[in-house]
Amino acid sequence: MKRYNITVNGTAYDVTVEEADAGAAPVQAAAPAPKKAAAPKAAPAGAQGNVKIEAPMPGTVMDVKLKVGDKVTNGTPIVIIEAMKMENEIPATCDGTIASINVNKGDSVNTGTLIATINA
């Protein structure tokens, strides 16, 4: 028996494969349940800030620069999104405190995806 970890469309599967005898008919095994992906660092309900920062374009989160509780000023980079092989800083749009970070490094985002919230 051999064990493999296989990722399909971002979902990880732990697969065990048996080697069949040369004359034996193949046997189809049931697929194991997928492992759950890590949840984003979202704030608990009611802890969201009053200013929402959304992704202006689709891409991949390359870095999260701040954490919940950090003080920001207008223009402070919150995350870096790679889109079309260019790194784009997504800045705070006001002065305040980070109330939630709703994405993780490596996440794919679409236009309008909530990145973070700020208490202004």
Image: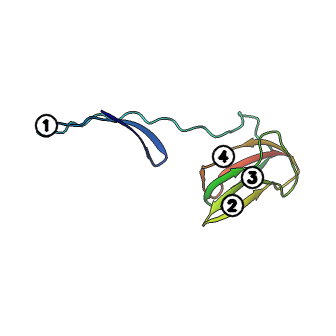
Measure the C-alpha gap from mark 1 to mark 2: 56 Å
Colouring scheme applied when the structure was drawn: rainbow
The residue located at (71%, 34%) in the rendering is 45
The residue located at (76%, 40%) in the rendering is 48
Q: Residues within 10 Å of mark 2 (few under 14, many from 20)?
A: some
Q: Earlier in the sequence, mark 3 or mark 1?
A: 1
Q: Amino acid at mark 4?
A: Val
Asked if the residues shown at circle 3 and circle 1 are in contact, with their CB atoms under 8 angstroms apart, the answer is: no
Asked if the residues shown at circle 1 and circle 2 are in contact, with their CB atoms under 8 angstroms apart, the answer is: no
Q: Residues within 10 Å of mark 1 (few under 14, many from 20)?
A: few
Q: Amino acid at mark 1?
A: Ala
Residue bearing the label numbered 4: 103
Quadrant in the picture for the N terminus: top left
Secondary structure category for the residue under label 1: loop
For marks 3 and 1, give the one nearer the viewer: 1
Q: Amino acid at mark 3?
A: Ile
Residue bearing the label numbered 1: 24
Residue bearing the label numbered 3: 53
Secondary structure category for the residue under label 4: loop
Image x and y of residue 30, in percent: 30, 34
The residue located at (54%, 38%) in the rendering is 37
Q: Earlier in the sequence, mark 1 or mark 2?
A: 1
Residue bearing the label numbered 2: 56
Measure the C-alpha gap from mark 4 to mark 1: 49 Å
Q: Earlier in the sequence, mark 4 or mark 1?
A: 1
